[in-house]
Image: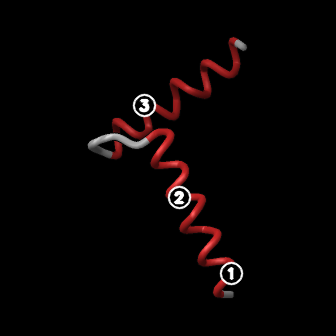
């Protein structure tokens, strides 16, 4: 159980490092842009 929590925190940290912004809407926009980039790739 503890390991799951640690993994979840680390995944969230990595996600925020990659897509993070000053607000939830900015983070969502960054994520959406990245997904669109991958579709074009």
Q: CA distance from mark 1 to mark 3?
A: 30 Å
Which is closer to the viewer, label 2 or label 3? 2
Q: Label for residue 12?
A: 2
Q: CA distance from mark 1 to mark 2?
A: 14 Å
Q: Label for residue 29?
A: 3
Q: Report which residue position mark 1 lands on.
A: 3
Q: Is residue 20 left or right of residue 8?
A: left
Look at the numbered disc 2 and give the secondary structure of its residue.
helix
Mark 1 vs mark 3: which is more N-terminal? 1
Badge 2 vs badge 3, beta-carbon distance below 8 Å:
no
Residue at (50% x, 40% y) in the render: 18
Residue at (61% x, 27% y) in the render: 35
Q: Position of residue 10 (x, y in %)?
A: 57, 63
Residue at (68% x, 87% y) in the render: 1
Look at the numbered disc 3 and give the secondary structure of its residue.
helix
In the image, is residue 38 above or below residue 8? above
Badge 1 vs badge 3, beta-carbon distance below 8 Å:
no
Mark 2 vs mark 3: which is more N-terminal? 2
Residue at (56% x, 27% y) in the render: 34
Q: Is residue 8 left or right of residue 29?
A: right
Q: CA distance from mark 2 to mark 3?
A: 17 Å
How dense is the environment of label 2, judged by Cα within 10 Å: few (below 14), some, or many (20 and up)? few
């Amino acid at each position: 159980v503890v390991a799951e929590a640690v993994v979840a925190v680390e995944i969230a940290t990595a996600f925020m490092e990659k897509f993070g912004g000053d607000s939830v809407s900015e983070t969502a926009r960054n994520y959406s842009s990245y997904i669109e980039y991958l579709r074009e790739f």
